[in-house]
Image: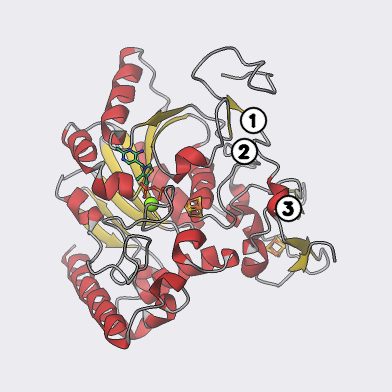
Amino acid sequence: MSSSAKTRKEKPITTLSSPTVGVDKTGFWRTFRPEVDGSKCTRCTLCWIYCPDGAITREEDDSPKIDYDYCKGCGICANECPVKAITMVREGE
Amino acid sequence: MVSIKELSKEEYLLKGHIACAGCGPAISLRLLFKALGNKVILVVPACCSSVIPGPYPFTSFAVPVQNMLFEATGATASGVVAALRQRDIKDVTVVGWAGDGGTFDIGIQALSGAAERETDFIYICYDNEAYGNTGVQRSGATPYGAWTTTTPTGKKERKKDIAFIMAAHRIPYIATACPSYPIDFIEKIRKAKEIKGTKFIHILAPCPTGWRYDTSKTVEMGRLAVRTGVWTLFEIEHGKFKLNPPSSRLIDRAKRKPVKEYLTLQGRFRKLTEVDIEKTQKWVDEDWERYRKLASNQ
Ligand SMILES: Cc1ncc(C[n+]2csc(CCOP(=O)(O)OP(=O)(O)O)c2C)c(N)n1
Ligand code: SF4
Ligand code: SF4
Ligand SMILES: [Mg+2]
């Protein structure tokens, strides 16, 4: 199933689709950007489990790291963080 | 009980998928893979989940997926299970992953047939209470009073009780879940995996696009659905009905929040009158009376 093809033209003719990270650069959809205050974060990992996009990864010490290439800015992480360690900041500010 | 930190960091719904921001079904898909890993074959009919992975020739699913016609999830899953048996492959779980339209409406005969054949698979209906993929039309799962593009003044009929329709098939395991309660969700899927036969899991998966609320409120909406009793977490295991926490603590009506708190946060219920809200409250209370009796009989 895996294939290194990057475009339709390079793909062999098949009905199979290849698992690919970054089918779309969904970070461009974002209006508000979540920012984590590491000094407040208790590393509960709730923001990680609730992210619809898998755009939050857990570091070695369980602190969250946001991948802005793919985060759509939905704001669920900021809404769910029990200690309000995440704030949504308008892009461009 | 597993804890969130014990869950794998591996992702099989890859970054860059094209679900709307704040999509409840996308959270549910991640939780499905946290529960089962990648030893799965998904059967996905036409629905948001066939669009979320993105267009051919790429996909954000890092597991084998059989995309199928809107109506045929149950039948296809039976075929996949038969093929695996023929090849003596025993360590792969077949999961039907269908929307509410594909389950309550057009897919119900194929699902009913698979259940009657006792096909050994997990059927998961992720319920966003409308046809999301095609732009929010009513389904048999859309609740009373909800706006959709085909119910512009609010739906006049009630939602089907699909879990109990499946209970009438006498399958060994039925459960409800909601991504707002990830541990309950994952444990139910893992339990279903260990049981032989047809397992049915009904997930309330809030959809900001169809329900008309802010994208940041998806998890909160699921939580409110449970706390108001509009959604109930339960299992029917070999015919035995059991409420799960936190629903099991809400049998007493005074413990439940008024349904109004849930309804008024969503734009789709904007046209509900006080009378409609009272009606909904009454129906919820009647459902709970039934759950109370079922739970105390066991
Ligand atoms: C036979 C048939 N009728 C209609 C359609 C168009 N169609 C594709 S998906 C869909 C709605 C799916 O709704 P649901 O099952 O609730 O999943 P959701 O999109 O909400 O995730 C419809 C009507 C189709 N693909 N096939
Ligand atoms: S939810 Fe808040 S406290 Fe928990 S890991 Fe995320 S940022 Fe840290
Ligand atoms: S319409 Fe709803 S269920 Fe479909 S992708 Fe958008 S948020 Fe998710
Ligand atoms: Mg739907």
Looking at the image, which residue is at 32% across and 87% down?
A: B274
Q: Residue B101: x, y in percent? A: 32, 49
Quote the CA–CA distance across marks 1 and 2: 7 Å
Is A44 placed left or right of B91 in the picture? right
Q: Residues within 10 Å of mark 3 (few under 14, many from 20)?
A: some
Residue A62 is labelled as: 3
Tag 3 secondary structure: loop
Q: Nearer the viewer, residue A53 or B102?
A: B102
* Residue position for label 2: B14
Tell me: is circle 3 under 8 Å from ligand 2.
yes
Looking at the image, which residue is at 29% across and 46% down?
A: B103
Tell me: is circle 2 under 8 Å from ligand 3.
no
Quote the CA–CA distance across marks 3 and 2: 20 Å
Tag 2 secondary structure: loop
- Circles 3, 2 touching at the beta carbon (< 8 Å): no
Q: Residue B265: x, y in percent? A: 48, 76
* Residue position for label 1: A20
Quote the CA–CA distance across marks 1 and 3: 25 Å
Is the residue B31 above or below the residue B158 in the image?
above
Single out the mark in the foreground, 1 or 3: 1
